[in-house]
Image (cartoon, helix red, strand yellow):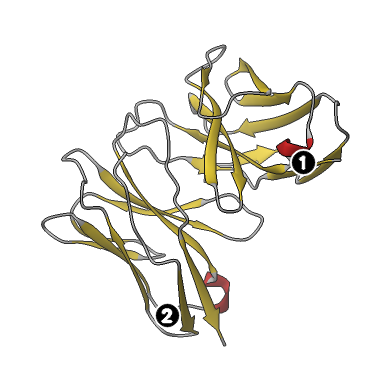
Amino acid sequence: DVKVTQSSRYLVKRTGEKVFLECVQDMDHENMFWYRQDPGLGLRLIYFSYDVKMKEKGDIPEGYSVSREKKERFSLILESASTNQTSMYLCASRIRDSLKNIQYFGAGTRLSVL
Amino acid sequence: LAKTTQPISMDSYEGQEVNITCSHNNIATNDYITWYQQFPSQGPRFIIQGYKTKVTNEVASLFIPADRKSSTLSLPRVSLSDTAVYYCLVGVSNDYKLSFGAGTTVTVRA
């Protein structure tokens, strides 16, 4: 089974802090994704990475950055956390050029910014 | 990405079969139909995917009529642990985005 592991299930941070969310996958997938999920808004794509050191903005990249130094690890960075970034953050991975585009998700990190 | 429409919620009882229909009238020729399941405070989990006719795995069956404008996810003999949100997605392999709508909240009662 594909395993996508997010470093924290729950996180509480203060406004203005720099926050790192880590995601590791064990299936040698090229593509990795960061989403946030909010009630009534569904899943929204923040950033994705085609491969190591490659990244593309998703629909809502403002206030976030990412890092992909190794194939298995994709980090989401909140440069200066704000209360409107309180959300559930989900990491996913998939095989590049997959005919079927199946994404495998981690358990999520519920972030509260106070 | 093709737009999908599915019921907001469905109630069922343990042991019953649950069928969730998803409409996707503007599905394109190369689009696959994929269903995910999400439990509270968990990430979505891939359940099943199909292109046409019927697909079955250990978890569910997916029925797709010839015109492919809709699809039905069938969950046989549900249990309380099948209570979750079920999402229908339609897209092609090079879509890096997944468009999750509101999904269908299935509640299974004892």
**Residue type pointed to by label 1:** Ser
Mark 2: amino acid? Arg
Left or right for B102, reference B68: right
Question: Residue at (53%, 38%) from the top-left corner?
Answer: A44
Q: Quadrant of residue B94?
A: top left
Q: Is residue A80 above or below residue B36?
A: above
Mark in the foreground, 2 or 1: 1
The answer for which chain carries disc 1 is A
Query: x%, y% of residue B52?
Result: 18, 53
Secondary structure of residue under mark 1? loop
- Of the numbered discs in the image, which one, if any, rests on residue B9? none
Place of residue A60 in the rendered image (x, y in percent of width and height, measured from the top left) = 56, 29
For the point 22% across and 49% down, which residue is it? B51
**Do callouts 2 and 1 point to residues on the same chain?**
no
Q: Secondary structure at mark 2?
A: loop
Residue B54 placement, left or right of A100: left
The crowding category of the residue bearing disc 1, from other C-alpha atoms within 10 Å (few below 14, some 14 to 19, many at least 20), is: some
Q: Residue furthest top?
A: A53
The residue shown at (57%, 72%) is: B81
Is residue B95 visible in this depiction of the protein? yes
Residue B54 position (above or below residue A54): below
C-alpha distance separating marks 2 and 1: 34 Å
Q: Quadrant of the N terminus of chain B?
A: top left
Residue A7 visible (yes or no): no
Q: Which residue is mark 1?
A: A8
Locate residue A105, reporting x and y percent: 55, 43
- Give left or right: position of B92 versus B53: right
Q: Position of residue A29 (x, y in %)?
A: 49, 28
The residue carrying mark 2 is: B77
Q: Would residue B35 be found to the left or right of residue B105 on screen?
A: left
Quick one: A38 or B31, which is closer to the camera? A38
Q: Are marks 2 and 1 in contact (CB under 8 Å)?
A: no
